[in-house]
Every structure is written in structure tokens, then in C-alpha cells.
Amino acid sequence: MKTNKKKNNIKNDKINLVIKIMSYILLFMSILSLGFIIYFDLLPVAYLILFIAIIGVIVFGLFKLLNSRLRKWIRTLFLIPTILLIFLFALICFYCYGTIDFFGSIFDIGIRQDYYSIYVLKDSLYNKIEDLEDKYIATHNIEDKGIEKSIDKVSKKIEFKLAEYASNSEAVESVINSENEAVLMLNSNMDILKEDNELYSNLRPIYTFSVTTKVETLSSDKNVLKESFVLYISGIDTSGKVGAKARSDVNILVAVNPKTNKILLLNTPRDYYVNLASYNKMDKLTHAGVYGIEESVNTLSKLYNVDVDYYARLNFTTFINVVEKLDGITVDVPVSFCEQTSDRKSTKQICLKKGVQTLNGEQALALSRTRHTISGGDRGRIENQMLVLSAIIDKILSPKIIVNYTSLLNSISDSIVTNVDQKSVTRLIKNQLDENPSWSIETLSTEGTDAYKPTYSTGNQNVYVMEPKLESVTNAKNKLKEILNTN
């Protein structure tokens, strides 16, 4: 009998301990989740006070009941609402912490990691950097921070003679013409040259390295719930991380008016012949990205006479992941076509038929990329990109996004960089959840005429560009003013 009584006492002590532990976990989780709610400003003040009062009464009541002298079975019964509340608080903490972690990883602090290479002729006997000891290496713009650091890095490997040229094309041609043995250049600049002139494909890299620099980023202190703002979306045709400089193949200004709930998606062709803001030289818009996202922002601001407040730079890896995490998007495909997959080395193709359908990530990317297989070329591609982006925005604004919220953030954290601060985003999310406003989305693309002209990035050679139509740019300026007018 004594043995059974002792066992029962031990069992009761364990149950009491579990009940006590659960009560303290409840207290801790409630304080933590309320802290997150206050930090993110997720509720209006009146609702926040009411929420704290209700949760406070429930938590305090459960805590007292679980630690009272009531019978064990009664206190055990109260464990059910306790566990449910702990689960709810854990869910709040999970979403909030995931958001903090996500914005910490994508917020642009101005660190740039770019890749440079030393190129020699394909049939050259030089195979490693040491082979260029005491040789001439050509380059352009030695005052650039990246080139300056690159020269310093190469100097630590070998002794060499530096030959500076007025443009990248002249530096490369000096190697082709056997005036110098090699050329030092940003990889993206070489990609630009090879895209427009097959002659430059006669070079190969023998030494590639990364250079890290720090730039001053753009910032905005606007209240996105009260003031209109403009977001620049830059899409680069690469995979992996987006820290390195690269051509911007997608250039979309998103003008948002929170007072009228209107959004304008303004797409500018990648080959638009524009004046680079920092260099006062004519170039393709896509090339502006090679000089940093700040250059793209400032160039578009100058073109449309509008202040760009925020930017988000993403690559096609991001694009696929977003659509996949949204469980696809519904798009009315305008024409049947076939296009390569995201793996450019693969011979596989994605073929879509005309009509309304739900697209997965690869299919949405194929629709956004294709231009050679449809009429209109780059103009047709721009229209497709607007269709896809509108479908993504519609899906993101849906309350159903909460189901895939954290997985969506995790999937794109390595493939996007932005200066949009966490407070602005949480304000928009709070407003969307609280008022569920209906947004009106308009799309517009500027137009131009085909031409062949020299650009800053390619030197004196004439390359394909799109000359802006004055009336088209003027129309875009007027539309931006109309959308952004909060009156």
C-alpha cells in the first residue's frame, strides 16, 4: 500500500511540475508575442490596447488557475486552452522573427561584391596570371574604386605595366591588335562587349577574382500609408546572389498611391537610349546596371522627372521561387510560343499555348523572357512581363499569402537586395490585413524606334539601341504625375 501511495505521490508531483512549467511557458510566450506585435505596429492603438487587455486577463487567469490549489483534474483540464494559446503565440513569434531575419538579410547596406578578370587572346600561350610577369595589361577608368582595388590585387600577385585607355572597347582592342598582352575588366563589361561584337569573343579569362566595395545607398523616410512613392524593380538575367554588378534586363517603375489605392507599372525597354545620370553619356538603359543600381535609379529619375524612393534588385532565380511559393499565377498568355528553360546550357524548351492558364515558376519565366519567338521582339516581351508582374502582385495582395509567407521569404532571401525598410513593409501589410483595400493596377510601356548608335559602354562602335519617342516619354511623365497626386 505504501509503495502504491508513494508512486501516486511521485506521479502527482510530475503532473504538478508539468502544469507549473506550462503556466510559465504561457506567460513567457505571451510577453514575447506582445513585444513582437508592438514592435511591428501590427494593430491600431485602440485595438492594441483591447488586445493586450483581453490576452492579459486570459493569460493571468490561466496562470493563476494552473498554480492554484484546485483539484488536479481541473487544472489539467485548463492545460488544453493553455497549449492552444502557446501554439498561437509561437506562431506569431515565428512569423515575426522570420520577417526580421528576412529583412536583415536583404536590406542593402551598400556592400558590393563584383567579379573582375584578366583576359588574353584565345590562342595566347598565357594560361595563368604568373605568365604575365612584367607584361602590359590594359584597362579603363583607373579612378573607379573597383578597378583601383583590382589593380592593387593583381599587383600583389605579379609585377606588370599598366596601360590606360579611354574606353573598355579600346582597352580590349589593344589586346586584339597585339599592343598589350592582356586586359583587366569587370566581367559584366566584357559581357556587354561580347554581346554586340563577335570580335571580342576571341578573348578568354585566365584569372578571375572578386572585389568588395562600399557605396552610399539611397534612403527614404516616407510614410507609405500617407504619401505616394515610387519603387524601381531591376531584374538581372543571372542566377544566384545579386550583389555583383550586372546588366538590368527588366526596368519597371512601380508608382503607388496609398490614398487612391492606385498602382502604375511603368516598363522601360532595356535598350532605351538614355543619358547616364552620373556620366552624362548616352548608353543603353540595361548597361546602367553595370555601374550600380544607383545609376539605374538616377538615370530613370532623370528620364521621367520623378523621384524614385525605393528599389528592389532581383534575378531570375527569385522570379521562379516567388511564383512557385505562390502556387502559380493565372495569366492570359497572348500567343503560343516556345522558350528555353532557366538553365541556358540545356536544350530543353518550355512551350505554352495561347489562353488563360495557371503558370508555374519556369513557365512564368519563359513567358517573361521570350522575345525572339514572338512578334514585336522586345516590345512583346515587355508586355508579357507586365502581365506576369500584375498577376504576381494580385496573388501577393491576397490574404491567402499568409499560408506561404515564411517559405516565400526564405526562398528569395539570397536573390534580392532592396532599400525598402522593414517599417514601410509592415505598415503596408498591416493596412492590407486591416482594411483589405482593393487596388487598381495600370500598366504602361514607353516606346521607341530602332537605331544603331555608339554607347558609353561599347565605345565608338555603333550598336543596336531604341531611340525614345518624345510623346511616349511625355505621356509616361504625365501618367506618373496623375497616379502620384494624392489630392
Image (cartoon, rainbow, N blue to C red):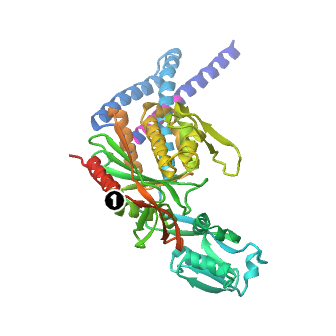
Residue in the foreground of this view, choosing between 381 and 204: 381
In magenta, the rendered stretch is 22-35
Which residue is situated farthest in the top direction here?
Answer: 1
Q: Would you place residue 214 above or below residue 352 in this image?
A: below
Using the image as rendered, state which of residue 7 and residue 305 is in the foreground.
305
Q: Residue 217: x and y, percent?
A: 43, 63
Tell how many labels.
1
What residue is rendered at 50% in x and 37% in y?
Answer: 334
Name the side, left or right, on which 258 lies relative to 460.
Answer: left
Residue 190: % across, % down:
61, 68
Residue at 31% over, 52% down: 475
Q: Quadrant of residue 156?
A: bottom right
The residue drawn where x is 47% and y is 22% is 81
Q: Pointer 1: residues within 10 angstroms few (<14), some, or many (20+)?
A: few
Q: Is 33 covered by the magenta stretch?
A: yes
Front residue of 90 and 112: 112
* Residue 466 in which image quadrant: bottom left
Q: Main secondary structure of the magenta part?
A: helix
Name the element at disc 1. Answer: helix
In the picture, measured across the screen, residue 58 lies left or right of residue 9, that is: left
> Can residue 89 be seen by looking at this rendering?
no
Horizontal side of residue 356 vs 421, given as left or right: right
Q: Position of residue 395 (x, y in %)?
A: 46, 35
In front here: 117 or 150?
117
Question: Can the viewer see residue 16 in this picture?
Answer: yes
Q: Residue at x 62, y 38 (%)?
A: 351
Counting from the top left corner in percent of width and height, residue 471 is at: 32, 56
Q: Which residue is label 1 attached to?
A: 470
What amino acid does circle 1 point to? Leu
| Residue 140 within the segment the image draws in magenta | no
